[in-house]
Image (tube, rainbow, N blue to C red):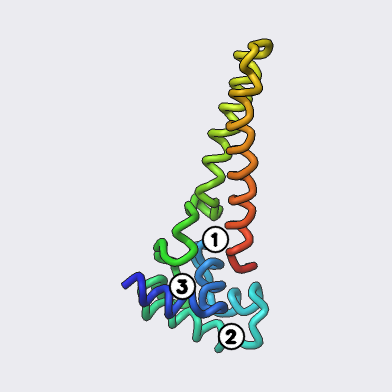
Amino acid sequence: MAENLERDVAGEYNTFRVYVYLLRKKTAGKREVQRDLGFSSPQLAAHHLEKLVRVGLAKEEGFYFRVVPQSFGVLRFFFVVDRWIVPKTFFLAVVFLTITVGFLVILPRHPYLYLALFPSVLGLVASILLSLYFHRLLPKT
């Protein structure tokens, strides 16, 4: 199933854009998708929405489509929190930031402060860079 989703949705840029858009909006109509994503016609938006319905990533409810959240492809690296799509590495950055600040507060004059601080700052920088990289992988909606 996940292989089909990666081929049918993640492999097709505009269909994936519509899915990410629906993840953020939760529900949307054909004209709303067409206007917000810059499609040339509502029929093009309808094509992508109906494709999402066929693969089980959306449900049609009258004139609107409701998202069915699923983790596949690049979306495995993200948490969907309400209308936010947050890279999982962001939470790792928060942990490393807490450790770094903790070292600075608890061990301000300790002779081994820099030895303890180095790996925490390195982890903080790496997790921030990874978060930015993953965020750029999402299509613009």
Dot 3 or dot 1: first in sequence order is 1
Residue with the most extreme left position: 1
Query: Can you say whether 129 is above or below 1 in the image?
Result: above
Q: Is residue 50 left or right of residue 44?
A: left
Query: Can you say whether 107 is above or below 140 in the image?
Result: above
Residue 61 at least partly seen: no
Q: Quadrant of the N terminus?
A: bottom left
Residue depicted at 61% across the width and 79% down the height: 34
Q: What residue is pinned by disc 2?
A: 42
Amino acid under label 2?
Answer: Pro
Dot 2 or dot 1: first in sequence order is 1
Query: Can you say whether 95 is above or below 30 in the image?
Result: above
Q: What residue is pinned by disc 3?
A: 65
Amino acid under label 1?
Answer: Arg
Q: What residue is pinned by disc 1?
A: 24
Q: Secondary structure at mark 3?
A: strand
Q: Position of residue 21 (x, y in %)?
A: 56, 67
Residue depicted at 63% across the width and 45% down the height: 128
Residue depicted at 40% across the width and 65% down the height: 68
Please state which of the two labelled residues, at mark 3 or mark 1, is closer to the viewer.
1
User: For mark 3, does the 10 Å Cα neighbourhood hold few (<14), some (14 to 19), or many (20 or more) residues?
Assistant: many
User: For mark 1, does the 10 Å Cα neighbourhood hold few (<14), some (14 to 19), or many (20 or more) residues?
Assistant: some
- Which quarter of the figure has residue 60? bottom left
Q: CA distance from mark 2 to mark 1?
A: 20 Å
